[in-house]
Amino acid sequence: MADPAAPRRWALGLRALGLGALGWAATGCGPTAPGFDATVPLTDGVFVGESDPDGEGAFGRATVTVTDGRISASEYVTIQEDGSIKAEDYGKNNDGTIGNPARYRAAQKAVAAFDVYARQLIEVGVPADVDVISGATIGYNQFLEAATAALVASQEAQPALGLSPSAPQ
């Protein structure tokens, strides 16, 4: 089994370079995030970016696949402090019951927004151009940070040289 902490450690390195803080999202500045320039080509591959944790220790993880220089697939999840992914149980009590139906509906609305954010990223190509969904603002801000980190990683990656394994060196 792959080390689930490996992408997080990788993303921490990006934050150390100053690419993780996206205070611009809250202020509504500009169509692109610091460190991401939509005019710079994307390198093909699969890239992972993560956000800083929120006040409860949850962080966002975006996985972006680039094919022929364009985003061809995108996935976004929020991982809680205990390592679980916010999914169908998010908003339920520890025993799996729904103690507060309004809280559960709100939590599930946020979870549903995660897929919308990922799909929109494929369509628009720039994280800041993805529309925020009311009730999922924290997830949106974490999505912006994580998706931007993944795309910056694609821009910074070296393209493959096209050598076959049997080619003489």
Image: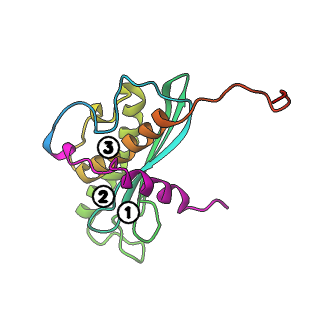
Query: In the structure shown, which secondary structural element does the residue marked by tag 1 occupy?
Result: loop
Query: In the structure shown, which secondary structural element does the residue marked by tag 2 occupy?
Result: helix
- Badge 3 crowding class, 10 Å Cα cut-off, few under 14, some 14 to 19, many 20 or more, is many
Q: Residue at x 35, y 39 (%)?
A: 117
| Residue that numbered label 1 is attached to | 90
On screen, residue 158 versus residue 11, left or right, reads right
Q: Residue at x 45, y 24 (%)?
A: 41
Query: In the structure shown, which secondary structural element does the residue marked by tag 3 occupy?
Result: helix
Pinpoint residue 44: horizontal percent, then vertical percent.
Answer: 56, 30
- Badge 1 crowding class, 10 Å Cα cut-off, few under 14, some 14 to 19, many 20 or more, is many
- Asked if the residues shown at circle 2 and circle 1 are in contact, with their CB atoms under 8 angstroms apart, the answer is yes
Furthest residue to the front? 169
- The image quadrant that residue 107 belongs to is bottom left
Give amino acid for label 3: Leu
- Asked if the residues shown at circle 1 and circle 3 are in contact, with their CB atoms under 8 angstroms apart, the answer is no
Q: Residue at x 37, y 32 (%)?
A: 120
Q: Nearer the viewer, residue 169 or 135?
A: 169
